[in-house]
Image: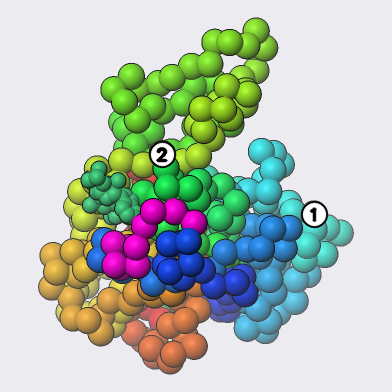
Amino acid sequence: MYNTRIAGVGKFVPEKVVTNHDLEKMMDTSDEWIRERTGIEERHWLRRGEETSSTMGAKAAKIAIEKAGITPEDIDFIIFATLSPDYFFPGNGVLLQRHLGITNKEVGALDIRNQCSGFIYGLEVADQFIKTGKYKNILLVGAEFHSGGLDISTRGRGLSVLFGDGAGAVVLQPVEDNNKGVLTTHIHSDGTNAEILSATIPGMHGGYYAEDDSIFGFDDSTEHPFVLLTQKMMDDNMIFPYMDGQAVFKTAVRKFPEVIIEGLKTAGLTTKDVKLVIPHQANLRISQFVQKILRLTDDQMFNNIQKYGNTTAASIPIALSEVLEQGLLEDGDVLVLAAFGSGFTWGSAVIRW
Ligand code: ACO
Protein backbone atom coordinates (compact mmCIF):
# COMPACT_ATOMS: atom_id res chain seq x y z
CA MET A 1 0.00 0.00 0.00
CA TYR A 2 1.18 3.50 -0.84
CA ASN A 3 0.53 6.80 0.89
CA THR A 4 -0.63 9.88 -1.03
CA ARG A 5 1.62 12.91 -1.25
CA ILE A 6 0.82 16.37 -2.55
CA ALA A 7 3.35 16.78 -5.34
CA GLY A 8 2.27 20.15 -6.76
CA VAL A 9 -0.10 22.96 -5.82
CA GLY A 10 -1.50 25.85 -7.87
CA LYS A 11 -4.00 28.66 -7.48
CA PHE A 12 -5.78 31.19 -9.65
CA VAL A 13 -7.91 34.14 -8.61
CA PRO A 14 -9.46 36.75 -10.92
CA GLU A 15 -7.69 40.08 -11.24
CA LYS A 16 -10.61 42.24 -10.08
CA VAL A 17 -10.60 42.97 -6.35
CA VAL A 18 -13.90 43.97 -4.74
CA THR A 19 -13.45 45.66 -1.37
CA ASN A 20 -16.09 46.02 1.31
CA HIS A 21 -16.26 49.71 0.36
CA ASP A 22 -17.07 48.68 -3.22
CA LEU A 23 -19.96 46.60 -1.84
CA GLU A 24 -21.23 49.65 0.08
CA LYS A 25 -21.98 51.19 -3.33
CA MET A 26 -24.06 48.17 -4.43
CA MET A 27 -26.10 47.47 -1.29
CA ASP A 28 -26.88 48.72 2.19
CA THR A 29 -23.87 47.31 4.04
CA SER A 30 -20.71 48.58 5.67
CA ASP A 31 -17.05 47.69 5.84
CA GLU A 32 -17.41 47.61 9.63
CA TRP A 33 -20.33 45.12 9.60
CA ILE A 34 -18.56 42.76 7.20
CA ARG A 35 -15.19 42.87 9.00
CA GLU A 36 -16.73 42.45 12.43
CA ARG A 37 -18.91 39.44 11.55
CA THR A 38 -16.74 37.71 8.97
CA GLY A 39 -13.20 39.13 8.98
CA ILE A 40 -13.43 39.64 5.21
CA GLU A 41 -11.82 42.79 3.78
CA GLU A 42 -11.92 42.06 0.07
CA ARG A 43 -12.58 39.28 -2.44
CA HIS A 44 -11.88 38.64 -6.12
CA TRP A 45 -14.84 38.65 -8.50
CA LEU A 46 -14.79 37.77 -12.18
CA ARG A 47 -15.64 40.31 -14.80
CA ARG A 48 -18.58 39.23 -16.96
CA GLY A 49 -17.51 36.67 -19.57
CA GLU A 50 -13.91 36.59 -18.34
CA GLU A 51 -13.64 33.03 -16.96
CA THR A 52 -15.76 30.20 -15.55
CA SER A 53 -15.07 27.76 -12.72
CA SER A 54 -13.70 25.23 -15.24
CA THR A 55 -11.33 27.71 -16.92
CA MET A 56 -10.10 29.02 -13.57
CA GLY A 57 -9.65 25.42 -12.46
CA ALA A 58 -7.57 24.75 -15.57
CA LYS A 59 -5.31 27.72 -14.82
CA ALA A 60 -4.70 26.52 -11.25
CA ALA A 61 -4.22 22.95 -12.53
CA LYS A 62 -1.53 23.98 -15.04
CA ILE A 63 0.51 25.51 -12.22
CA ALA A 64 0.05 22.43 -9.99
CA ILE A 65 1.09 20.15 -12.86
CA GLU A 66 4.18 22.23 -13.56
CA LYS A 67 5.12 22.32 -9.86
CA ALA A 68 4.80 18.53 -9.73
CA GLY A 69 7.27 18.32 -12.61
CA ILE A 70 4.91 16.43 -14.90
CA THR A 71 2.85 17.26 -18.01
CA PRO A 72 -0.95 17.14 -18.50
CA GLU A 73 -0.50 13.85 -20.41
CA ASP A 74 0.78 12.24 -17.19
CA ILE A 75 -2.54 12.83 -15.38
CA ASP A 76 -4.43 9.56 -15.05
CA PHE A 77 -7.51 10.71 -13.12
CA ILE A 78 -9.32 14.02 -12.66
CA ILE A 79 -11.48 15.06 -9.70
CA PHE A 80 -13.29 18.40 -9.86
CA ALA A 81 -15.11 19.84 -6.84
CA THR A 82 -17.41 22.82 -7.35
CA LEU A 83 -20.89 24.11 -6.51
CA SER A 84 -20.76 26.58 -9.38
CA PRO A 85 -20.17 24.40 -12.47
CA ASP A 86 -20.33 25.78 -16.00
CA TYR A 87 -23.31 23.59 -16.92
CA PHE A 88 -26.12 21.70 -15.20
CA PHE A 89 -24.48 18.74 -16.98
CA PRO A 90 -21.93 17.55 -18.02
CA GLY A 91 -19.76 18.32 -15.03
CA ASN A 92 -16.63 20.42 -14.90
CA GLY A 93 -14.29 17.38 -14.85
CA VAL A 94 -14.59 16.72 -18.58
CA LEU A 95 -14.40 20.45 -19.35
CA LEU A 96 -11.16 20.67 -17.41
CA GLN A 97 -9.85 17.66 -19.32
CA ARG A 98 -10.62 19.51 -22.57
CA HIS A 99 -9.02 22.76 -21.38
CA LEU A 100 -5.85 20.82 -20.51
CA GLY A 101 -5.83 19.14 -23.93
CA ILE A 102 -5.73 15.59 -22.59
CA THR A 103 -8.77 14.29 -24.43
CA ASN A 104 -6.70 11.75 -26.38
CA LYS A 105 -5.93 9.86 -23.16
CA GLU A 106 -9.56 9.23 -22.10
CA VAL A 107 -8.79 9.41 -18.39
CA GLY A 108 -11.65 9.24 -15.89
CA ALA A 109 -13.11 12.56 -14.70
CA LEU A 110 -15.16 12.64 -11.51
CA ASP A 111 -17.31 15.53 -10.31
CA ILE A 112 -17.69 16.16 -6.59
CA ARG A 113 -20.72 18.04 -5.24
CA ASN A 114 -19.94 18.54 -1.60
CA GLN A 115 -19.67 22.31 -1.51
CA CYS A 116 -17.25 23.63 1.14
CA SER A 117 -16.14 20.07 1.96
CA GLY A 118 -15.59 19.23 -1.72
CA PHE A 119 -11.81 19.37 -1.59
CA ILE A 120 -11.59 17.04 1.45
CA TYR A 121 -14.12 14.65 -0.10
CA GLY A 122 -12.02 14.67 -3.29
CA LEU A 123 -8.84 14.07 -1.32
CA GLU A 124 -10.35 11.04 0.44
CA VAL A 125 -11.49 9.56 -2.89
CA ALA A 126 -8.10 10.21 -4.51
CA ASP A 127 -6.29 8.73 -1.50
CA GLN A 128 -8.08 5.39 -1.96
CA PHE A 129 -7.04 5.19 -5.63
CA ILE A 130 -3.43 6.12 -4.86
CA LYS A 131 -3.17 3.74 -1.88
CA THR A 132 -4.16 0.76 -3.98
CA GLY A 133 -1.77 1.72 -6.78
CA LYS A 134 -4.57 2.26 -9.30
CA TYR A 135 -3.47 5.81 -10.28
CA LYS A 136 -0.12 7.60 -10.12
CA ASN A 137 -1.00 11.22 -10.91
CA ILE A 138 -4.41 12.43 -9.79
CA LEU A 139 -5.41 16.02 -10.47
CA LEU A 140 -7.75 17.36 -7.77
CA VAL A 141 -9.29 20.77 -8.43
CA GLY A 142 -11.61 23.01 -6.42
CA ALA A 143 -12.97 26.08 -8.20
CA GLU A 144 -15.87 28.48 -7.73
CA PHE A 145 -17.51 31.21 -9.76
CA HIS A 146 -19.72 32.59 -6.99
CA SER A 147 -20.12 36.18 -8.04
CA GLY A 148 -22.32 35.31 -11.03
CA GLY A 149 -24.88 33.61 -8.77
CA LEU A 150 -25.24 36.10 -5.93
CA ASP A 151 -27.93 38.66 -5.26
CA ILE A 152 -25.82 41.81 -4.97
CA SER A 153 -28.74 44.00 -3.93
CA THR A 154 -29.52 44.76 -0.27
CA ARG A 155 -31.91 41.79 -0.21
CA GLY A 156 -28.97 39.40 -0.75
CA ARG A 157 -26.46 41.11 1.53
CA GLY A 158 -26.50 38.37 4.19
CA LEU A 159 -24.85 36.01 1.69
CA SER A 160 -23.27 37.99 -1.11
CA VAL A 161 -20.68 39.78 1.03
CA LEU A 162 -19.22 36.43 2.09
CA PHE A 163 -18.23 34.82 -1.18
CA GLY A 164 -15.35 35.17 -3.64
CA ASP A 165 -14.24 33.56 -6.90
CA GLY A 166 -11.12 31.48 -7.44
CA ALA A 167 -9.56 28.09 -7.98
CA GLY A 168 -6.97 25.81 -6.43
CA ALA A 169 -5.49 22.53 -7.60
CA VAL A 170 -3.17 19.78 -6.42
CA VAL A 171 -1.40 16.87 -8.08
CA LEU A 172 -1.44 13.74 -5.92
CA GLN A 173 1.13 10.98 -6.25
CA PRO A 174 2.06 7.76 -4.42
CA VAL A 175 4.87 7.70 -1.87
CA GLU A 176 6.28 4.47 -0.44
CA ASP A 177 7.05 5.88 3.03
CA ASN A 178 3.92 5.12 5.11
CA ASN A 179 4.74 7.89 7.56
CA LYS A 180 4.61 10.55 4.82
CA GLY A 181 1.80 12.25 2.92
CA VAL A 182 -1.87 11.71 3.79
CA LEU A 183 -2.00 9.85 7.11
CA THR A 184 -5.78 9.90 7.63
CA THR A 185 -8.93 11.28 6.04
CA HIS A 186 -12.42 11.39 7.53
CA ILE A 187 -15.58 12.54 5.78
CA HIS A 188 -19.09 12.88 7.20
CA SER A 189 -22.51 14.18 6.32
CA ASP A 190 -25.92 14.79 7.86
CA GLY A 191 -28.70 15.66 5.45
CA THR A 192 -31.33 16.30 8.13
CA ASN A 193 -31.45 20.01 7.36
CA ALA A 194 -30.01 19.97 3.87
CA GLU A 195 -31.76 23.19 2.83
CA ILE A 196 -30.29 25.32 5.65
CA LEU A 197 -27.58 26.33 3.19
CA SER A 198 -28.77 25.66 -0.31
CA ALA A 199 -29.57 26.76 -3.83
CA THR A 200 -32.67 24.71 -4.67
CA ILE A 201 -33.37 26.35 -8.01
CA PRO A 202 -32.84 25.40 -10.76
CA GLY A 203 -33.53 21.78 -9.85
CA MET A 204 -35.80 18.87 -10.65
CA HIS A 205 -37.49 19.14 -7.27
CA GLY A 206 -39.31 22.20 -8.51
CA GLY A 207 -39.57 23.75 -5.09
CA TYR A 208 -37.60 26.29 -3.18
CA TYR A 209 -36.68 26.87 0.39
CA ALA A 210 -38.64 29.76 1.76
CA GLU A 211 -37.40 32.12 4.43
CA ASP A 212 -40.71 31.96 6.28
CA ASP A 213 -41.89 28.81 8.07
CA SER A 214 -43.42 27.18 5.02
CA ILE A 215 -40.31 25.05 4.38
CA PHE A 216 -40.86 24.68 0.64
CA GLY A 217 -42.57 26.93 -1.81
CA PHE A 218 -43.78 25.57 -5.13
CA ASP A 219 -44.57 27.26 -8.37
CA ASP A 220 -47.74 25.47 -9.48
CA SER A 221 -48.45 28.05 -12.15
CA THR A 222 -46.83 25.88 -14.80
CA GLU A 223 -48.13 22.68 -16.42
CA HIS A 224 -44.63 21.69 -17.49
CA PRO A 225 -43.51 18.48 -15.75
CA PHE A 226 -39.88 19.57 -15.47
CA VAL A 227 -39.77 22.55 -13.19
CA LEU A 228 -36.10 23.43 -13.45
CA LEU A 229 -36.75 27.13 -13.56
CA THR A 230 -39.94 29.09 -14.07
CA GLN A 231 -40.69 32.74 -14.67
CA LYS A 232 -42.36 32.95 -11.26
CA MET A 233 -39.21 31.71 -9.54
CA MET A 234 -37.26 34.39 -11.39
CA ASP A 235 -39.85 37.07 -10.57
CA ASP A 236 -39.88 36.04 -6.88
CA ASN A 237 -36.10 36.25 -6.84
CA MET A 238 -35.85 32.67 -5.57
CA ILE A 239 -32.90 31.73 -7.75
CA PHE A 240 -30.28 32.85 -5.27
CA PRO A 241 -28.72 30.74 -2.49
CA TYR A 242 -30.40 30.59 0.91
CA MET A 243 -28.58 30.39 4.24
CA ASP A 244 -29.59 30.34 7.88
CA GLY A 245 -26.28 31.90 8.94
CA GLN A 246 -26.63 31.34 12.66
CA ALA A 247 -27.50 27.65 12.27
CA VAL A 248 -24.47 27.22 10.01
CA PHE A 249 -22.24 29.02 12.51
CA LYS A 250 -23.40 26.93 15.49
CA THR A 251 -22.96 23.60 13.71
CA ALA A 252 -19.64 24.57 12.11
CA VAL A 253 -17.96 25.46 15.41
CA ARG A 254 -18.90 21.99 16.75
CA LYS A 255 -18.05 19.90 13.71
CA PHE A 256 -14.68 21.48 12.81
CA PRO A 257 -13.03 20.61 16.17
CA GLU A 258 -14.70 17.17 16.29
CA VAL A 259 -13.39 16.08 12.92
CA ILE A 260 -9.92 17.55 13.49
CA ILE A 261 -9.58 15.62 16.76
CA GLU A 262 -10.95 12.49 15.08
CA GLY A 263 -8.25 12.74 12.39
CA LEU A 264 -5.43 13.40 14.86
CA LYS A 265 -6.50 10.53 17.13
CA THR A 266 -6.55 8.10 14.22
CA ALA A 267 -3.07 9.25 13.25
CA GLY A 268 -1.88 8.87 16.86
CA LEU A 269 -1.18 12.60 17.16
CA THR A 270 -2.35 15.54 19.27
CA THR A 271 -2.79 19.23 18.54
CA LYS A 272 0.69 19.78 19.97
CA ASP A 273 2.16 17.82 17.05
CA VAL A 274 0.45 20.06 14.50
CA LYS A 275 2.47 22.64 12.61
CA LEU A 276 -0.47 24.11 10.77
CA VAL A 277 -4.24 23.79 10.43
CA ILE A 278 -5.76 25.04 7.19
CA PRO A 279 -9.50 25.26 7.81
CA HIS A 280 -11.90 25.84 4.96
CA GLN A 281 -12.12 29.63 4.88
CA ALA A 282 -15.80 29.98 5.81
CA ASN A 283 -15.65 32.91 8.15
CA LEU A 284 -12.80 34.26 10.30
CA ARG A 285 -15.04 34.14 13.38
CA ILE A 286 -15.65 30.40 12.86
CA SER A 287 -11.89 29.79 12.52
CA GLN A 288 -11.19 31.82 15.67
CA PHE A 289 -13.78 29.80 17.61
CA VAL A 290 -12.24 26.54 16.39
CA GLN A 291 -8.75 27.78 17.29
CA LYS A 292 -9.93 28.62 20.80
CA ILE A 293 -11.71 25.29 21.35
CA LEU A 294 -8.62 23.37 20.19
CA ARG A 295 -6.25 25.71 22.06
CA LEU A 296 -4.15 26.29 18.97
CA THR A 297 -1.68 29.17 18.77
CA ASP A 298 -2.04 31.91 16.13
CA ASP A 299 0.91 30.37 14.28
CA GLN A 300 -0.89 27.01 14.06
CA MET A 301 -3.99 28.41 12.32
CA PHE A 302 -3.84 29.68 8.76
CA ASN A 303 -6.37 32.28 7.61
CA ASN A 304 -6.53 34.17 4.34
CA ILE A 305 -10.29 34.78 4.10
CA GLN A 306 -9.51 38.46 4.67
CA LYS A 307 -8.26 38.69 1.05
CA TYR A 308 -10.44 36.16 -0.77
CA GLY A 309 -13.75 35.77 1.06
CA ASN A 310 -15.23 32.29 1.12
CA THR A 311 -14.26 30.43 -2.06
CA THR A 312 -15.94 27.15 -1.01
CA ALA A 313 -14.26 24.14 -2.70
CA ALA A 314 -11.32 26.32 -3.74
CA SER A 315 -10.51 27.75 -0.32
CA ILE A 316 -8.26 24.96 1.02
CA PRO A 317 -6.07 24.55 -2.10
CA ILE A 318 -5.80 28.35 -2.49
CA ALA A 319 -4.70 28.58 1.16
CA LEU A 320 -2.28 25.66 0.75
CA SER A 321 -0.75 27.38 -2.23
CA GLU A 322 -0.17 30.53 -0.15
CA VAL A 323 1.22 28.51 2.75
CA LEU A 324 3.86 27.07 0.41
CA GLU A 325 4.59 30.47 -1.17
CA GLN A 326 5.23 31.80 2.35
CA GLY A 327 7.48 28.84 3.22
CA LEU A 328 5.37 27.85 6.22
CA LEU A 329 5.77 24.08 5.78
CA GLU A 330 8.92 22.03 6.08
CA ASP A 331 9.63 18.39 5.43
CA GLY A 332 8.06 16.27 8.18
CA ASP A 333 5.62 18.95 9.44
CA VAL A 334 2.10 17.83 10.34
CA LEU A 335 -0.58 19.67 8.37
CA VAL A 336 -4.30 19.36 9.08
CA LEU A 337 -6.95 20.29 6.52
CA ALA A 338 -10.55 20.59 7.69
CA ALA A 339 -13.84 21.65 6.17
CA PHE A 340 -17.51 22.10 6.97
CA GLY A 341 -20.30 23.20 4.69
CA SER A 342 -23.64 22.82 3.00
CA GLY A 343 -25.32 19.45 3.30
CA PHE A 344 -24.19 19.48 6.05
CA THR A 345 -20.92 17.81 5.09
CA TRP A 346 -17.59 17.97 6.88
CA GLY A 347 -14.22 16.29 6.94
CA SER A 348 -10.53 16.42 7.75
CA ALA A 349 -7.19 15.20 6.45
CA VAL A 350 -4.00 14.79 8.46
CA ILE A 351 -0.88 15.03 6.32
CA ARG A 352 2.80 14.67 7.09
CA TRP A 353 4.57 17.00 4.66
N1 ACO B 1 -24.51 44.28 5.94
C1 ACO B 1 -25.20 44.92 6.88
N2 ACO B 1 -26.20 44.35 7.59
C2 ACO B 1 -26.47 43.06 7.32
C3 ACO B 1 -25.77 42.33 6.34
C4 ACO B 1 -24.75 42.99 5.64
N3 ACO B 1 -24.04 42.38 4.69
N4 ACO B 1 -26.27 41.08 6.31
C5 ACO B 1 -27.24 41.01 7.22
N5 ACO B 1 -27.37 42.21 7.84
C6 ACO B 1 -28.28 42.60 8.90
C7 ACO B 1 -29.52 41.74 8.93
O1 ACO B 1 -30.48 42.20 8.03
C8 ACO B 1 -29.94 41.90 10.36
O2 ACO B 1 -30.59 43.15 10.50
P1 ACO B 1 -31.87 43.28 11.50
O3 ACO B 1 -31.30 42.96 12.86
O4 ACO B 1 -32.26 44.71 11.31
O5 ACO B 1 -32.85 42.27 11.03
C9 ACO B 1 -28.63 42.01 11.12
O6 ACO B 1 -27.65 42.39 10.14
C10 ACO B 1 -28.22 40.73 11.78
O7 ACO B 1 -28.38 39.66 10.84
P2 ACO B 1 -28.00 38.20 11.17
O8 ACO B 1 -28.19 37.36 9.95
O9 ACO B 1 -28.68 37.79 12.43
O10 ACO B 1 -26.44 38.39 11.43
P3 ACO B 1 -25.47 37.43 12.14
O11 ACO B 1 -24.95 38.07 13.34
O12 ACO B 1 -25.98 36.04 12.24
O13 ACO B 1 -24.29 37.41 11.07
C11 ACO B 1 -23.39 35.94 9.42
C12 ACO B 1 -24.52 36.88 9.78
C13 ACO B 1 -22.10 36.72 9.33
C14 ACO B 1 -23.69 35.32 8.08
C15 ACO B 1 -23.29 34.87 10.55
O14 ACO B 1 -24.54 34.28 10.79
C16 ACO B 1 -22.31 33.83 10.23
O15 ACO B 1 -21.12 34.07 10.26
N6 ACO B 1 -22.78 32.62 9.93
C17 ACO B 1 -21.93 31.56 9.48
C18 ACO B 1 -22.27 31.36 8.10
C19 ACO B 1 -21.08 31.26 7.23
O16 ACO B 1 -19.96 31.55 7.56
N7 ACO B 1 -21.36 30.85 6.03
C20 ACO B 1 -20.35 30.70 5.07
C21 ACO B 1 -20.80 29.73 4.08
S1 ACO B 1 -20.99 28.16 4.77
C22 ACO B 1 -19.52 27.57 5.01
O17 ACO B 1 -18.61 27.87 4.29
C23 ACO B 1 -19.35 26.69 6.10
Q: Using a 10 Å C-alpha cutoff, classify the residue at mark 1 as few (fewer than 14 neighbours), some (14 to 19) or many (20 or more).
A: few
Q: For residue 89, which numbered disc appears in the image?
A: none
Quickly name the residue at label 1. Answer: 106
Q: Is residue 220 left or right of residue 297?
A: right
C-alpha span from label 1 to label 2 = 38 Å
Residue found at the far right of this picture:
104
Above or below — where is 34 with respect to 66? above
Q: Residue at x 66, y 38 (%)?
A: 88
Range of magenta residues: 26-35
SS assignment at label 1 = loop
Above or below — where is 98 with respect to 85? below
Q: Name the image quarter holding residue 214.
A: top left
- The numbered mark, 1 or 2, whose residue comes first in the sequence reads 1
**Residue 242 included in the magenta stretch of the image:** no
Amino acid on which the number 2 mark rests in the picture: Tyr
Q: For residue 242, which numbered disc appears in the image?
A: 2
Say which quadrant the C terminus sits in: bottom left
